[in-house]
Amino acid sequence: MKFETPATTNPIDQLKIIGKPADRIDGPFKTTGTAPYAYERHDNIANPACGYVVGSAIAKGRIASMDLTAAKTASGVLAIVTADNAGKLAKGNFNFATLLGGPEIEHYHQAIALVVAETFEQARAAAQLVRVDYVKAEGAFDLAAVKDSGKPARITGGPADTAVGDFAGAFAVAPVQLDATYTTPDHAHAMMEPHASMAAWDGDKLIVWTSNQMIDWSVGELAKTLGMPKDKVRLISPFIGGGFGGKLWVRADALLAALGARAAGRPVKVALTRPMMFNNTVHRPATIQRIRIGATRDGKITAIGHEGWSGNLPGGKPEAAVQATRLLYAGANRMTATRLAVLDLPEGNAMRAPGEAPGMMALEIAIDEMAEKLGLDPIEFRILNDTQVDPEKPERAYSHRPLIACMGLGANRFDWSKRNPAPGRVRDGRWLVGIGMAAAFRNNPVMKSAARVRLDNRGVVVVETDMTDIGTGTYTIIAQTAAEMMGLPLDKIIVRLGDSTFPVSAGSGGQWGANSSTSGVYAACVKLREAVAQKLGFNSTEVDFADGQVRSGNRSVPLAQAAGESGIVAEDVMEFGDLGKKYQQSTFGAHFVEVGVDAATAEVRIRRMLAVCAAGRILNPKSARSQVIGAMTMGAGAALMEELAVDKRAGFFVNHDLAGYEVPVHADIPHQDVIFLDETDPMSSPMKAKGVGELGICGVGAAIANAIYNATGVRVRDYPITLDKLLARLPEVA
Amino acid sequence: MRSFTYERANSPAEAAAAAARKQGAKFIAGGTNLLDLMKLEIETPAHLIDVNRLGLDRIEPTADGGLRVGALVRNTDLAAHERVRRDYGVLSRALLAGASGQLRNKATTAGNMLQRTRCPYFYDTNQPCNKRQPGSGCSAIGGFSRQHAVIGASEACIATHPSDMAVAMRALDATVETIQPDGAARKIPIAEFHRLPGSTPEVETSLAPGELITAVTLPKPVGGKQIYRKVRDRASYAFALVSVAAIVQRDGSGCVALGGVAHKPWRVEAAEVELPRGAKAVTAKLLTDAKPTHENAFKLLLAERTLGAVLAEARG
């Protein structure tokens, strides 16, 4: 099915099951420990050998020699894989550093060996006997130091530089100006389940049980890396304990499990240990961002410019921090610029809302600062500069842009009008109290997605697609889609995901998963409806599927009966036309935050948070809410504590465990509310839905930063906003 | 993890004797710290002596009105004990500020005293660390040192002691009771128990090889307002940037110990005479000769301001 014109009324609009807060259909498996994750597929392989990854002890240089003698003879050891004996390996299209390093070392903890043994403990003990001599090379590890060597780098969906009108001229003459620089640090995905895979060979065929967001891409990557035809590789990933972008691509665990299984001649499983994850895999790269805004005295933006610097390994991509600034606010004269320097830190790559998340952390402080300079309420300033068209290409309208409605509803619910705009004036016992807000903005990409649906003689529909559920609720919304389309209750739908033998889906990334994958299921169900109608001799345009029955005129047949003994199978793929090019499709929201800052110690504690989101039709308000509160929590971490600390001498992230890399705990997140605007976007898909999982993180950090400013009068432009950045500027303790 | 042998001791004296007999032996109680370190091969004991069944898990009154806390009393039980809550509030509060419920259920009183530093370079066996590998150097000096010591550190080590409990014990003038391999008992005032790093940061306490902690004794209650204030980046489950254990009497006198600033709980009795004059005066003396790094200099101001808040709370 091709989606090329705006959606009209279709069976989804019945909203009998779609739009309802259904419990997760996979919930009971997870809460009873029966959902099988990659490292525990004992149901498939009873007794796999265990692999333990040896990571490079240096950041850059080469291995002079590796002594495996002691490790090889250690108890239980079956094989040791290194670049020397792994055979020829290609590099995938999506990873910049090689997954098995040596002799060249490209980053710290780059995998240089896999020790395979009968048990995990034996593999680990033997891995610690591998002796490596390195020759270190000089590397670049400090973004601020190499920033000026940055080269123009294309960002997703756009060139390195954009310019409209005369930014420099307009900024120079603007009566009110802001020119400020902001920084965001490197962030870790820190998902709960580490990267893990189990591999088994059957002749020249490879099966990998893994934890991966994008099955089809990753089949291709693994096949390419191993020099195999794609059809000889099968990936299975039905349950994923979080990914956040860190599992978009094949990582060392999957490749090394495959190589280890080949070397040991039996199935092997490999999980990265927690301390290995931070430097071995990928992270959200740090940014330096300069934002300049010029406005008239009455608050109209006349010039807006955003420059973003980041670093990555050679061949790597930039963090597209300027992305939102290209679209979010009006202003006749504008520029953005993206520069990428070479850094020899671990590979930077996508993390939840790449580009917009760190970009909005900066932009939405800048907007708050500008509003203050203008003496305007920050919401009023945003309303004044709202745009209903792409400000770089005014001929492109937004498909739907209710940002003002989000801010208005949020202001009302959060009692924004009671906020004292003068900073540092509100006290509650030991706490300096402040309120802040920020806009939320994230684009709404769509991706081709296929599914197969099978109706059987029990009246049960089985949906198969290689789509993944990374904890987001995909199983449930896919079941809801099929149930709505086929007129069945939810318990008559079985959903099977994450297997590369299933039709190729959109996968989970870029917040496109929910809308795209359910659209693929919609397309397959349209075909199934047609097949059912045809089999019964109904005119397919006048058929109603409801209550487990197919009705046409005064004929009514149970679906189970219609299926017959052999059942009916239908498969289709949803392909998206150019509506996304003709119209700017984005999701919008507004974040409101109240913080307390301890007047003595400057500890910041969030008191309450609200997000109002406009993201098209909400397929399941319960799982969508979970997505948004999770994103708000992640945003709070980015605002207040998360930072991969770089050792600029040795070139690695020092705090590489969950004691050192702090993410919020329950006590940090006291109260969260989420409101969804009741809306649909027919330009987006037949589901009229959009993404929401990444919208929730965009802007949260700035809302917290702005609340801290309102509480204390201290403006911090370098994340995370830890107490040491506030302490010296707080009033004396009595 | 390296292979090790294991035995279960039947008495404290036997445990101490066994530890002296076996090269590379370690005691194991709750194991919340030691096992993690063994998995990373930061600790590589050849032999473990399990002391969990030595009957050292009782809290008993002492003849002088104090309290003897058995070495194996779990952190959870100690924090909840009626006498501790009533007479040694600072200790109960310090315990509850540390770790998580699950860890406190396992962690013991003696083990808590013997926790090793959480310096990230100590934890990464690729990096030089004098505490882990004497003579290899200190990576934290000139490196990521936000959490590290601001006072009492050396050219060899700038690590901090991570315990909350020990800071309260220091403020309470606790005494560590031990048994030595020859069977002799010894009492070590807490002030002499933890060491500064000097040139031997791998030696963290004044315990002799094989010496086993049997109890920690608290003196007769001193009353006063007892406050433990722990400052950290997130609201729970993090080590202190700075913590303050304070016992403040009605007349403004009292005692103060700091956590998160040194290789041991930091207390300077001479600074406490300044208590009636306020936090600035106390910290000026308490942190004389502080040598912070660029990254942790904020701890000096933080200690002063946190103590100020504690004293204000004590005045109530």
Image (spheres, coloured by chain):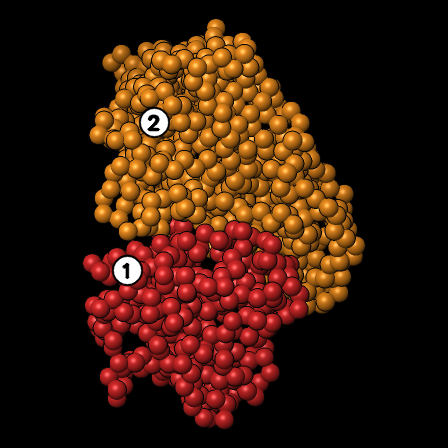
- Amino acid at dot 2: Ala
Subunit ID for the residue under disc 1: B
Q: Which residue in the protein does label 1 denote?
A: B311
Subunit ID for the residue under disc 2: A
The orange chain is A
For the residues marked 2 and 1, what is the alpha-carbon distance in whole angstroms? 41 Å
For mark 2, does the 10 Å Cα neighbourhood hold few (<14), some (14 to 19), or many (20 or more) residues?
many
Front in this rendered view, residue B143 or A348: B143
Residue B135 image position (x, y, % from top left) = 66, 69
Which residue occupies the extreme top position in the image?
A395
Q: Is residue B19 left or right of residue A79?
A: left
Residue visible at 54% across and 83% down?
B209
Q: Would you say residue A311 is visible in this rendering?
A: yes
Residue visible at 39% across and 61% down?
B283
- Amino acid at dot 1: Leu
Q: Which colour represents chain B?
A: red
Residue visible at 43% across and 27% down?
A366
Q: Is residue B205 above or below residue B116?
A: below
Front in this rendered view, residue A279 or A321: A321
Q: Nearer the viewer, mark 2 or mark 1?
A: 1
For mark 1, does the 10 Å Cα neighbourhood hold few (<14), some (14 to 19), or many (20 or more) residues?
many
Q: Is residue A134 above or below residue A87?
A: below
Residue A590 is marked as 2
Residue A685 image position (x, y, % from top left) = 42, 18
Q: Is residue A292 left or right of residue A635?
A: right
